[in-house]
Image (tube, rainbow, N blue to C red):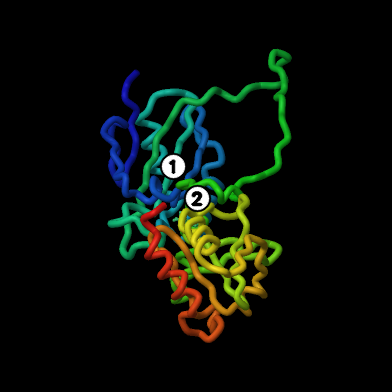
Amino acid sequence: MTDSIVFLNGTFMPQSEAMISPLDRGFLFGDGIYEVIPAYDRKMVGFAPHIRRLQNSLTAIGINLDWSEDKWRQLLSELLRQNSGDSLAIYIQVSRGVSPKRQHGFPDNIEPTLFMMCYAIKPPVNYDDGNHQGLHLVSQQDLRWRQCHIKSTSLLGNVLHYQSSQDHNVDECLLFNEAEQITEASSCNVFVVKNKQIFTPSLDSQLLPGITRAIVLDLLRTHTDYQVLEQNISLQQARSADEIWLTSSTKNIAPAITLDGEKIGSGKIGKTYKEVNSLFNQFKYDY
Ligand SMILES: Cc1ncc(COP(=O)(O)O)c(C=O)c1O
């Protein structure tokens, strides 16, 4: 099979020569968007609405690539011209670009990565011709974007939440679900302290089962008399907490002191945090 021609960051080239850095945020975070445009005999179906949806997707995730329809049409026509086949899909992917380091927040001055290729697709099936059966289906609950217990690299949702917290000039966000119950932060689990009780949301598909969370729970249960509760925490309860901590492998245990501009408890780093953090530092290598 001859090498197909692809377009990568401004250059047409054989697919075998197209290379993207593993630090590309499309690879690391799923931080990108895509389109697929079918073309039969080099004629595209739905070119303009596809390009409008592409622009809308780019705008929605804050990638700046504001090309005219004419520029897109010219490039896509050239891509079709350089590839053989009568029934082709044009695949367009734009990621936020290559990061100097892995971090959720958008890096400054990052150039988007634009990759386009064609691949052969079957000509549309004519279900009217009497030679084709219809499709067989199975019903399933829609779980998309709701499987946060999987440590998936599809982190666009987390990335957008984290960036929004940066845009608010704060460090992290406290996420809650439709029932206004706390789930987690963009890349941390959450603990809430109130009146000698320590709460953390119970594990389900709405949060990642953090390793730091598990270590903290074990330390609390083994070395302290605090009542430790894995259960729902309402946003209201979080607002009236004595302390809130975030936990993750890179943050360890981090105390929060304000929520939406209001003090959490005394607005100072709490004494329960200090006690538990010192336990954590004492025993963290034992796990
Ligand atoms: C969404 C999310 N929740 C929680 C955590 C904390 O998990 P761990 O303590 O294993 O680092 C992370 C860590 O990356 C995360 O991405």
Image quarter of residue 99: bottom left
Residue bearing mark 2: 54
The residue lying at 56 percent from left, 49 percent from top is: 149
Percent x, y of residue 105: 40, 63
Q: Is residue 231 left or right of residue 112?
A: right
Where 15 sits versus 130, above or below?
Answer: below
Q: Is residue 248 visible?
A: yes
Which residue is more in the foreground, 281 or 207? 281
- Mark 2 falls on what kind of element? helix
Residue bearing mark 1: 92
Where 286 sits versus 259, above or below?
Answer: above
Percent x, y of residue 147: 59, 48
Compute the Cα span from label 1 to label 2: 9 Å
The residue lying at 50 percent from left, 50 percent from top is: 54
Kindly identify the amino acid type of the residue bearing the numbered disc 2: Leu
Which residue is more in the foreground, 95 or 73? 95
- Mark 1 falls on what kind of element? strand
Percent x, y of residue 89: 48, 32
Which residue is more in the foreground, 262 or 113? 262
Whether residues under marks 1 and 2 lie with C-beta atoms below 8 angstroms apart, the answer is: yes
Label 1 CB sits under 8 Å from any ligand 1 atom? no
Image quarter of residue 78: top left
